Image: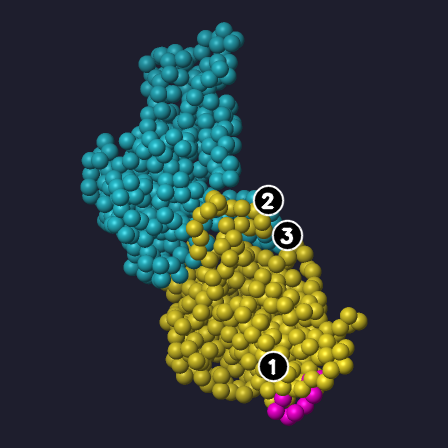
Chain colours: A cyan, B yellow
Amino acid sequence: MADEDWQRRVRTVWWEIDAQGAAVCLVDQTLLPQQVSYLHLRHEHDVAEAITTLKVRGAPAIGVTAAFGIALGLYRFCNRHRQQEEQITSAKALAHVKEVGALLGSTRPTALNLFWAIARMIDCAEEVARMQATAEQMLQRLSQEAQAIADEDAEACWQMGQYGATLISDGDILLTHCNAGALATAGIGTALAPIYTAHKSGKHIHVYVDETRPVLQGARLTAWELQQEGVPLTLIADNMAGHFMRHGGIRAVFVGADRIAGNGDVANKIGTYSVAVLASVHQIPFYVVAPCATIDLTLASGEQIPIEKRPLDEVTTMRGIVIAPAGVRVANPAFDVTPHQYVTAIITERGIARPNYEETLRQHCRAKNPGKVDA
Amino acid sequence: MADEDWQRRVRTVWWEIDAQGAAVCLVDQTLLPQQVSYLHLRHEHDVAEAITTLKVRGAPAIGVTAAFGIALGLYRFCNRHRQQEEQITSAKALAHVKEVGALLGSTRPTALNLFWAIARMIDCAEEVARMQATAEQMLQRLSQEAQAIADEDAEACWQMGQYGATLISDGDILLTHCNAGALATAGIGTALAPIYTAHKSGKHIHVYVDETRPVLQGARLTAWELQQEGVPLTLIADNMAGHFMRHGGIRAVFVGADRIAGNGDVANKIGTYSVAVLASVHQIPFYVVAPCATIDLTLASGEQIPIEKRPLDEVTTMRGIVIAPAGVRVANPAFDVTPHQYVTAIITERGIARPNYEETLRQHCRAKNPGKVDA
């Protein structure tokens, strides 16, 4: 199971019912690492805003957040009608769940986990509605389902850690881009899970961390996470990766993913493609670590993955400080696509998938339980 | 000659004598683009500090600045002795010139132009000393020599612009890294000279500008320069270069250099190597533009070029704002080395050098006048 030590230090996302009612709770990642500040969100609009503004980010984490957000939406809906002493049919509750799902699904386009979690919650609501249960029963079922999504994510992280750690040897120097750690999931992370697992098992490793402009998830989040866990690291600017691949003895690259097409093409944080090309030229294995919920078998190739364009002031300012001339034209794609040719292996909770990904990813997605495939 | 329009808008470095005496004058590049503020430095220690702290940067510009700095040192020396009504021998003046040269040479280790300019000034002082001239005569000669270095740099920039522009076609999309523009020279730049020349001749070009972490010379200086000159540009984070090489139709990369070894290996701003590798994989020509004063024929390969390590807070802070966890380990090499295999051509004031660089760079360096070789 997920590392309990880690979970005590920082909690990415959870569901809570206190005196004021239900809340989706998050650490505000925009304030890290200077401030560890938890948000208690009590309205689905606030959950949507938290996803859009990157208060919570990371494909698995936004999936879990959206699942809890749907439960929160239904909670508020039931509460409102209870106060008005109205009866609500499960059909009406289902319609509301779909509305909340649409709201949360409109926040960010690239990470599949978001749509996967929303679809799973709606499926669950539809199942309850078909049974003619009450809205309250639907709420109970949906809050359980959201918690199951969170728990399964934590379990998947742990499994990815187990599989991925077999690719890491004592003494290895690794490189990671962006944050695919505990803060990106409900567990110990995707790309960082093998790193944590290897470290805990006593392997001596050192991790180069790309700062990951423009939002600095590497500098702010990954460096902080690794530091907390005592994993030795060196923070570098993104443009230093090639230099340290040539001179720094880097033995493998581990990154997460926001969506993986059926052929193994990987959409991940902007800059991942450059890292993959550089790794290939330096004959360094390039590993992608992501749960099956990130794999989109409906897309034949990565060219079909929608790429989010983020606000331009992410590039022209840094924490409010202007760093570029006024009026300059800027590009800010949040993700890029790494063609499968550059991907040495994809580690999921079901094992280590290697090319031909058309086959192996299907095997991973078909398996019902974690830890059942080693394609 | 150098573009007069541009020179009116911003002056990188010049020598001035006003009511308070002699001054090395600079635009403070650490304040750009928000503030255009000129410094009048009246002590050689201030000149050294300005180079160390990047108030002036860019290999040719720091060479010119050091030349003026030596003239300033001798000016102060002569002045002091004149006030004390002491006679000074040219031998004593020469010793002082060498001291000032050592001070200025200790500021930054990588750019050859710095050492080249200092050596040229000392050679000149030695020549005057051999003629048994007065210290005042030496001062006159050294201030002329420093001005000649500045004027020749401006002329070299113009020539590099002429040669380099032949490599740019109407409609081309280009990419540049760091700032190798007017602000890096006493003229219209090195890597940006062909771009300005092509633009002025009516070619429609568009330039992707890497922001160039950690010091953001791309975002702060290159984007601003191009904007001032009306050259269309798109500012991107460094890690987007690969993505836009794959999807943005980039047709050529132009960068400057801080030192070029005899075999054509190029030391330039950190990140240049990654850009060169990415360009190679995408079959995009990678051009280095630098005057012969940047070519170090004493070094057989780039591995021998000393690489400056800059203060770590350049990476962990941005304009005073902390962007990484406290106590994190950081690497901050200011330059990297691009092996000559990745360099399509090197454009100097003497023409376009292509491999085998062992031969062609020697031809360029041997030629006495600009515009005489087309190797």
Q: Nearer the viewer, residue B44 or B62?
A: B44
> Is A272 placed above or below A67 here?
below
Q: Which residue is mark 2?
A: A320
Residue type pointed to by label 1: Ala
Seen as rendered, the residue at the extreme right is B19
Q: Secondary structure at mark 2?
A: loop
Visible residue check, residue A51: no
Q: Secondary structure at mark 3?
A: loop
Q: Residues within 10 Å of mark 3 (few under 14, many from 20)?
A: few
Q: Position of residue A162 (x, y in %)?
A: 25, 39
Q: Nearer the viewer, residue A69 or A81?
A: A69
Q: Residue at x 77, y 77 (%)?
A: B83
- Magenta stretch in the rendered image: B129-136
Measured in 3D between alpha carbons, the distance from the residue under mark 2 to the one under mark 1, in whole angstroms, is 50 Å
Residue type pointed to by label 2: Gly
Measured in 3D between alpha carbons, the distance from the residue under mark 3 to the one under mark 2, in whole angstroms, is 14 Å
Q: Residues within 10 Å of mark 1 (few under 14, many from 20)?
A: some
Magenta-colored stretch includes residue B33: no
Pointer 2 chain: A
Between marks 1 and 3 in the image, the one whose residue lies nearer the viewer: 1
Pointer 1 chain: B
Q: Position of residue A161 (x, y in %)?
A: 28, 40
Q: Secondary structure at mark 1?
A: helix
Q: Which mark is residue B95?
A: 1
